[in-house]
Image: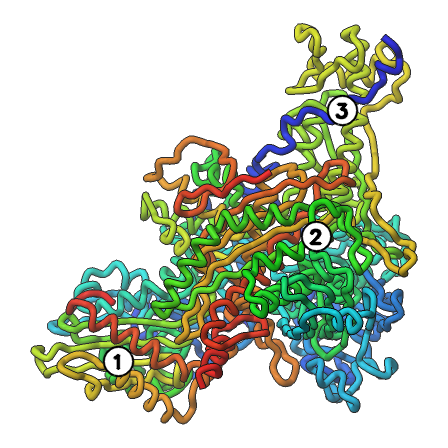
Amino acid sequence: MNPGSDELVITLNGARRDATVDRRKLLVEALREDFETTGPKVGCATGDCGACTVLMDGEIRKSCLELAVAANGSVITTLEGISDGQLTPLQEAFWDEYAFQCGFCLSGMLFSAQDLIDRVPNPTDLEIRSAISGNLCRCTGYDTIVNAIRRAAPGSSATTRHRPSIEESEDGKSASPSS
Amino acid sequence: MISASFRYETPSSAAEAAGLLNAGAQVMGGGTWVVPALNHGVRQPKVIIDLRRAGLGGIERDGDTVRVGATCTYADVLTSSLVATELPLLKTMALGVTGGRQILNQGTIGGSVAAARPSSDAPAVVVALGGRVVVLGPDGGRIVDADTFFVGPERTVLGSNEIVVALEFSSARGLHVGYSKLKHGASSWPIVTAAAVLRDADAAGGPAVAVTLGGIAGAPLSVDLGDCLVDGQVEENRARTAIAEQVDLIEAPWSDVIASAEYRRAVAPVVGVRAVRMAAGSTAGDPA
Amino acid sequence: MSLEADLARPAQPASAYVGDRQRKHNGNSFLTGEVMYTADLTLPNLAHVAILRSPHAHAHVRRMDTRAAESMPGVVGVLTGAQAAAISDPIPFLLDPAGLGGKNAPVRCLAGDEVVYAGQPVAAVLADTPADAAAAARAIDVDYEVLPAVLDIKTALAADAALVYPDWGDNVMLAGAFGPDDFETQAATADHVLEGELRIQRSTPSPMETRAYIADWDQRRSALTWYGTTQNPHPQRFVLAKALRIPEHSIRVIAPPAGGAFGLKMHGHPEETLVAVLSRQFGRPVKWVESRAECLLQGGREQLQRFRVAYDNDGRVRAFYDEFTADHGAMAAGAGWGMAFVGANSFPSGYDIQHCRVEYKIVVTNKPPSVGMKPFGKDSAVVVLERAMDLVAEATGLDPAEVRRRNFVAADLFPYTAASGMVLDSGSYHSVLENALTMIDYDRRRTDQQVARLAGRAIGIGIGFEMLAEGADVPASFVTAYDSATVRVDPSGHVTVLTGATSPGGGNDTAFAQIVADRVGVGPADVEVVQGDTALCPYGTGNLSSRGLVVGGGAVALAADDIGEKLRAIAAGMLQVGRGEIELRDGFATASGDPSKALPLAVVANAAYTLGYVFAPDIEPALESTRAFKMPNVRQVPDDQGRYSMYTTFSNAVYVSVIELCTETGVVEVIDHAIVHDCGTQVNPLFVEGQVRGGVVMGIGAAIGETIVYDSTGHLSSDSFKQYLLRRAIDLPSLAVGHEVTPSPFSNLGAKGVGESGYAAAEASLMGAVNDALNPLGARVDDFPLSAERLLRSIQAARS
């Protein structure tokens, strides 16, 4: 084995996986290239955009800030491992509320969102906005993401799938439809 | 991607880590600054010493001292009931760290202290709490008062063969604390931070109030506001003036792409007084 | 029944899906990680590129030694500018300033002897891994002779300025004007004249996905397959063909789903050609992924605006004069300079000011080239006009909303020919304004503002009205107001749409599925949409100028109607009823008079292929139609005043912001905001709102905090998201969104472009709101960004 490589053994999306990985790689690169899970994205490589967020040993982490070699023995979940044959309530809510457009930030957002509603079953809008403030989105302007998370939170009362006709503002006022 | 290869070490004790240090080595706590620096070729160390398995992650009490291990993450600080009761200012600081929950899970307080960035939260708070930095080198350990640990921007008294193993604090339980920081939106790192600590007149040592500013000089700047106390209350105009005077004396004021030195100078008294106001308005032992 | 009645085309189908808030097409593929973006793709034997970029803003390349690099581990080869020039041609311009009487300079995939900006590609290394390529790039030894650089407009226009391109004789790429040159005459009869100026900083589109390209040269066939983040696959193919000196038909361009574009990914970037040259030269498939720092090199919008307004006491503007200078950076083969042209052409926004004169100048400097970014220069006209309206309000004592009311193009004046020659199609600006003011509860806000001021709080309210020209057709370019689509139903009844329009995230594929569903009678989930592949899709110009839905969807509608007609003909024959009686809905062809007469569409489709002679012998076989839709309202032959009209749809919006300004720190907080938007018929209101929301947040960012910063030597200082500060969720309150629908009289869907909406209105509104907050303090600002530092300085200056 190349002295600049390591054998990495991880549990990835529930399966034991191993690969020989160039030691220079970031965890996000190893996941995408050596382990072929392209769900986590590289958006900045400085830990700012959150597109590389994964679940690692029970907590969400930005995988561009981890060396691949440091992840040996870890239990990791990527986007590909979130749904188990069926979309989660959070994923359905994201779809219903149009919480993703180009989809590039989606993986990271889902992890940050799920982490919040796992810890805080009935989050306030401020808590929701704070929880996704480690993730950048350039398409949606965030409101629909907030709506999706609010709906998917276990403590939320909005459990049925519905199609709101006009976006509701934060304090419940309806925007007036015109025309 | 990182383009130069390196040896990767995960020492299982602080002593082992210290023994590995040399000029070509880079120590890593959570890696939130070190890894991007490697990725952009800013640093190309021959050896990376990852402290995550060196047993430096605990938070414990030792008599009247609270000891926070260097590799404690901000999340560890947030979930610690010991920190909540004895060092609430530290908890408040951890809550507001830029970068989302992910960074709270990954960033370490020892790493932030060792990196000594004017744009970080931890250094000024550690100084404000009168913290002590526990350092270990191959020749043994030493303890450095935080207010002498930080020398300038990204410069501390750490030798190239020394690591930070822990931070020690006396309990701040009996103190009023306040924390305020100015950012330009959630994306921005802190521009000016202020950690205020206020001791009641009837507490041991008598009344005292001080605010420690980050982001204004290369190292945290402490301003004693004792002279601003009027009948046990901080007179805010006096406090603003006192802070401004100290800021004016800085020889190498800090600036970066986000905010100039003039701006920091202008807002430092404002942010400082906000922190003091919070401390004055809080109950002793409450978080800021 | 007569044959004519049988063949009569039915009216617009009853909309089951168009107008509905359908979920994103194939959303599950995104949610499960199935979707592959360009950087996710890999090919066998792939090699990776690292680009060596100039460290100097202006320099002569004396010597380049690549020997050390070539012998480093994993290196496949190194390409210098000189070598690239021998085997490739300059990159064709997306828009050529020489076409308007301006100047250009050739742009190649690698710099030659001269480098004109820090960051310009000078050499490329191909290696087995990205890390090996990066290491080797650092080992290339280049000897530069550093030359004086011009880094701002003033320096570039000085009499003794160093020249970016010596053979130009000056640093002016293009200058021009729109409108009658009669401001002085008009001003002489107006009650007053006021002056103003605005400086706008450089910002950047910064989609979350950076650019990425993969080139796969097939030696045996001398053919290229090129994958990449391009907004315009077919024009991209043309560009690559010319640069590589190969026939266009030997190139296949594939644009995988993209992670946002916002103008950044329009063609013309050196790296697009570079990967193809490398693949052909070294015989390996080649991949390049842009770093975020490289992505932040691309920017634009930097300009200096000066304006004069002649107005009467009643707030009515009689004449408008604007002159502006744009700092383009170095020359590019992309669309960046077009923004200044379009910006000038967009005055006076949606205001009825016939005497409007705009003079513009585009200057080159030794900074990275401008790249197209939404809303492509139209923001210039908007922010200037909105500032002007606010200044008129201040001067006359009228409410800013009232000034706008008195100057809007009234609803009964459409189609309205503006001074620039643009013909605005339709609009209900007054109604949009009233609704926006109602949504934000404007009168109460003004009262609250007075109360707050007494308590020492600086609250500001700003109105931003944007009129956005979309759907351009620029002569002699691939910016077109037409696009093509194929709709195909196979014998099993499955529907496929192939379109020349692309969607880098905005979701027009969902809209196309809805359009087809209504016209062919299937559900949107049963429609497959294929985009972005030049081998499969009919000719189109992709995504730009907010026209994907309008003309792409227009073509889809035409082709789907053809299919519907054929299905109706076959079904009518099978059901023995008149063709005009057949309804296509919910997967069935049903006789409207007798619902018991119904056939599954799959059966009808099969019959179209196998029983055509029996049921509809007059119908051309195969359920496939390729159609192009072209907007009719383009004038490329000048009118009697020498004016052109290139734009075909005109959306508009009013955005109102309520801000609080901290007078001690200069920090601005948006405490509430609302927008009412009109893009005509909405095929999918959920998607329309999504575009508007995203545009607003981007515009707020540009107004308050996003600044591309260069140091005194022309190096990028803001090279990460720690310095280029995008808005995050916690920064803003939720946005109330309302809509007006004033259809386009010219698009067959009645729709207008929405892809660039929200940005300009938000940016303008914030300038107004901040000045509204500063006014009582005797302070004002005329520069973007509205940074805390700038605002605090303005407050301090007013105090002293």
**Residue hosting label 1:** B236
Residue at image location 81% in from the left, 17% down from the top: C608
Q: Quadrant of the C terminus of chain C?
A: bottom left
What residue type is disc 1 on?
Glu
Picture coordinates of residue B27, whole percent (x, y): 40, 74
**Residue hosting label 3:** C11
What residue type is disc 3 on?
Ala
Q: Nearer the viewer, residue B157 or C42?
A: B157
What colour-coding does the image apply?
rainbow
What residue type is disc 2 on?
Val
Q: Quadrant of the N terminus of chain C?
A: top right
Q: Is residue C364 left or right of residue B29?
A: right
From mark 1 to mark 2, how far is it between C-alphas? 54 Å
Picture layout, residue C389 above or below residue B223: above
**Label 1: how many Cα within 10 Å (few below 14, some 14–19, many 20+):** some
Q: Nearer the viewer, residue C664 or C753?
A: C664
Chain of the residue that carries numbered disc 3 in the rendered image? C
As helix, strand or loop, the secondary structure at mark 3 comes to loop
Residue at image location 69% in from the left, 57% down from the top: C351
Picture coordinates of residue C203, whole percent (x, y): 62, 68
* Residue C274 seen anywhere in this rendered image of the structure: no
Picture layout, residue C434 above or below residue B12: above
Chain of the residue that carries numbered disc 1 in the rendered image? B
On residue C409, which mark appears?
2
